[in-house]
Amino acid sequence: MARRANPTRAGGARQRLPKQFDAADHTGPTLQSVYGGRTLLGFLISRGRLGTEAYTPDEVSIGVFSTIKAAADAISDSAEQWRAAS
């Protein structure tokens, strides 16, 4: 039996992707690298409702932040402090 397409608001039809490709069901943490040019400044890991955790390049946690921008700014600030101390 053929699978029926789901109607969209525009009145057209679209076929639903298999469940393994459905991004809305993704619940695991995501990892993003933060670079300044070619230099690795740190990592961002999504913690779901808790927010986004920021890490230094040597995997030391900077903290958990409510927004991705705040976490990325914390990584940038940490890198600047490290450069100033060197």
Image (tube, rainbow, N blue to C red):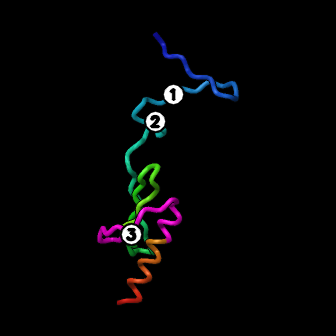
In what element is the residue under mark 1?
A: loop
Tag 3 residue: 62
Quadrant of residue 52 in the image? Answer: bottom left
Say which amino acid is labelled 2. Asp
Residue in the picture at 41% in, 78% down: 79
Quadrant of residue 38 in the image? Answer: bottom left
Q: Residue 41: image x %, image y %? A: 40, 73
Outermost residue to the right: 10
Tag 1 residue: 16
For the residues bearing labels 1 and 2, Cβ distance under 8 angstroms:
yes
Which residues lie in the magenta part?
Answer: 56-73
- In the displayed structure image, the side of residue 10 where residue 13 appears, left or right: left
Please identify, in this view, whether the residue under mark 2 or under mark 3 is nearer the observer. 3
Say which amino acid is labelled 1. Arg
Residue in the picture at 46% in, 56% down: 51
Q: Residue 8: image x %, image y %? A: 64, 27
Outermost residue to the left: 58
